[in-house]
Structure formats: C-alpha cells, structure tokens
Image (cartoon, rainbow, N blue to C red):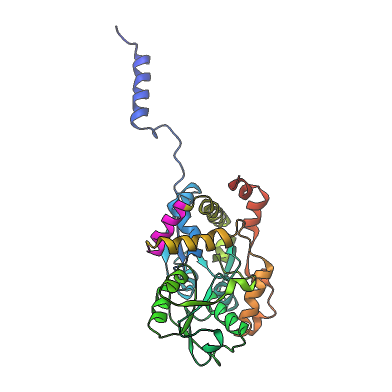
Amino acid sequence: MKLRPFVLFTIFLIVLGAVLPGAYAAESPPLRKVRMAFTSLSSSMCPPWIARDAGIFNKHGLDVEVIATPTGVEGMNALIAGEVQFLQISGGTSASAALGGADVMVVGTTLESLVQQLIARPEVEKAEQLKGRTLGITRFGTSIDVGARLALRHFGLVPEKDVAIVQVGGMESMVAALQGNRIQAGILSYPAITQALKLGHHALLDVAALGIPYAFTGITTRGRLIREDADLVRRYVTAQTEAIASAKRDKTFALKVMGKYLRTANSAALAESYDVDVQKYMLKVPLTTVEAMRSVLDDLAARIPKAKDSEPRNFFDDSFVRQLQSSGFIDALYR
C-alpha cells in the first residue's frame, strides 16, 4: 500500500519530534547565573544549600554557585567587590558595613535569635571563673562577637577588661582552640556546640534564651542590585523562602544536605542542629523586623557611635518577603 506524501510528511514530523522533543517547543529561558556566599559552617546557613541541592533555585530560573567564606568579613568584602550577588550572613555584619558607607541591604532574616551558646572548658565551672581568662570568637563585629559581649555582661563581666576576647576564626578553629586550651571559653553555634560538648566541655549559657530579638542570619545583597534588577532579588528571596519550607518538611533530605556542606557524618550533631536551628528557630516568614535591627544597631553603637541614632529601616528592605506573604505564597508552602 502506497502512502500519500502528506501522510509521509506527517509521520516524519512525529518521528522527528520523538527524537528531538525540543525541536518545535518554545525554548525555556536560560537560567540566570548567580554567585552567593555563606559565611559560617553553621546549620543556620542551610537555606541556600537546600535551595541548590533540591533544585529550588533552578525552579525559579536561577543557576546558583554556592561558595563558602571563612567569616562574614571575607563574605562582605566579596559582596562589596561584586564577586558575589548574595550573602547568607548576620545582620550585624551587614549593618556595620552599611554604616561604613557600603551600599548593602538586608532583604530577609531567617533567624531572629542569637542561636549560640557560651561553651567553657571543664575547669571553668561557672561564668565568674572566666575573669582573667580568654574567650574566643570568630571575628570582631560578627554576630558571634555580639553573643560574646551579651553573655559576659549577663554575668556582670566587662568584655575586654575582665575577660580577654580573641579572634580565632571559623567554628572548626573555635573547637580546636578550646580543646587546645588556647581559649578557656567560646561562643559557638550548631553543630560545633554538639561537638564541643561531646569532647567534655560544657555550656554556661544559652544566648538565645536571653530572648533578645536580633537579625542573626539572613540574606544580604547590594542596594544597586535591588534598584537595577529587582526581579533577580525577588527570585532569589522566593527560592530561599521555599527552601526553608522544604527543610522543615523533609528532615531526611535536610540532614543529608547539611552533612554535605558542614562536612560531617556525625548524625547526632546534625540531628540536634536541625532540631534547634531549622525546626525551633528558623522563621517560616523570613521578615526582618525593626526590633531585630534595632538590637543590631544598639550593639554596634559602642564601636560605631552613629549607629545609636540610625533608623533601623534604612538597613533592610522587607518588600520582597512581604509580597510573598501577602500573595499567599508562604501559606501555600505549608498546606
């Protein structure tokens, strides 16, 4: 039986479509390449890790390279230089840079509590015994530095007078310095807290229990990017907000991703980190509040006097998260 030319041409198109499924389909727009940096080996930094490994960034049109920097200072320098477009960093480091003239802005806060503990060596049985000893932090001006000063003042100790404060570096260095007796106490975050306790050190204070609102961890970008490419910022904030919901819903996947980026297979440390940072303290609606930024500025005022009279709203832009909230997007993530 002979087939008519029209039928043959139709069959050809069907076969071609099967072999090259995108041949007649509209091409999807290319993913926008973005670089972001996280600034501490802490589980509080996990939203961009989840967003990348779960494909959530891709879903929102982004191809994100996730970069680790040792501390917030290095991360902020990279942002200011344009080497990255977004940072996962403390509000304190961001506000400090802005007060120094940098065009940076917080666009979301994922944790509004200082989720840290004052950890001491076994021979330091109570906080008063820290007098004349040394307390370690990551870097001056970071949220860890803030937690250290709050903790010492809570016990009636004067920072840098009663207790020396030294910069040690990242969390891994903090635990090593504690173990080696180079410092007698330190302000740690998870999972370093769990690791230090397992080594025989003990907690003198849960800083979060002080109940002080503080823009602890969140998203910072350049003001110029907000002005010139708000759509990119919106996509990024949307993806991270969705990643928080993913982390809260799927513990197994979250633990797998956290272990990868934290470079640990310690299941107990990861589980405790997840329970505290993700389930207990991570905000479903990552809004930056005036109260949390006011706490940041109050702390900075001791070193940067003009912070005292600064308006908190000049340091954050909550429009992107508020749009997600008012649209019902965030509520839908938890149904």
- At a point 48% along the width and 82% down the height, the residue shown is 185
- At a point 30% along the width and 8% down the height, the residue shown is 2
Residue occupying the far top of the picture: 1
Whether residue 86 is visible? no
What quarter of the picture does the N terminus occupy? top left
Q: Quadrant of residue 220?
A: bottom right
Q: Quadrant of residue 90?
A: bottom right
- Number of marks drawn: 0
Q: Quadrant of residue 115?
A: bottom right
Residue 223 covered by magenta stretch: no
- At a point 43% along the width and 53% down the height, the residue shown is 53
Residue 261 covered by magenta stretch: yes
Residue occupying the far left of the picture: 1
Across and down, in percent, residue 137 comes to 48, 80
Across and down, in percent, residue 258 comes to 43, 59
Q: Nearer the viewer, residue 323 or 225?
A: 323
User: In this picture, which residue range is highlighted in magenta?
Assistant: 252-264
- At a point 46% along the width and 66% down the height, the residue shown is 38
Would residue 154 be found to the left or right of residue 43 on screen?
right
Q: Nearer the viewer, residue 243 or 247?
A: 247
Q: Is residue 23 above or below residue 206?
A: above
Q: Is residue 326 above or below residue 194?
A: above
Q: Nearer the viewer, residue 60 or 329?
A: 329
- Main SS, magenta region, reads helix
Whether residue 28 is visible? yes
Q: Is residue 334 above or below residue 135?
A: above
What quarter of the picture does the C terminus occupy? top right
Across and down, in percent, residue 3 comes to 32, 11
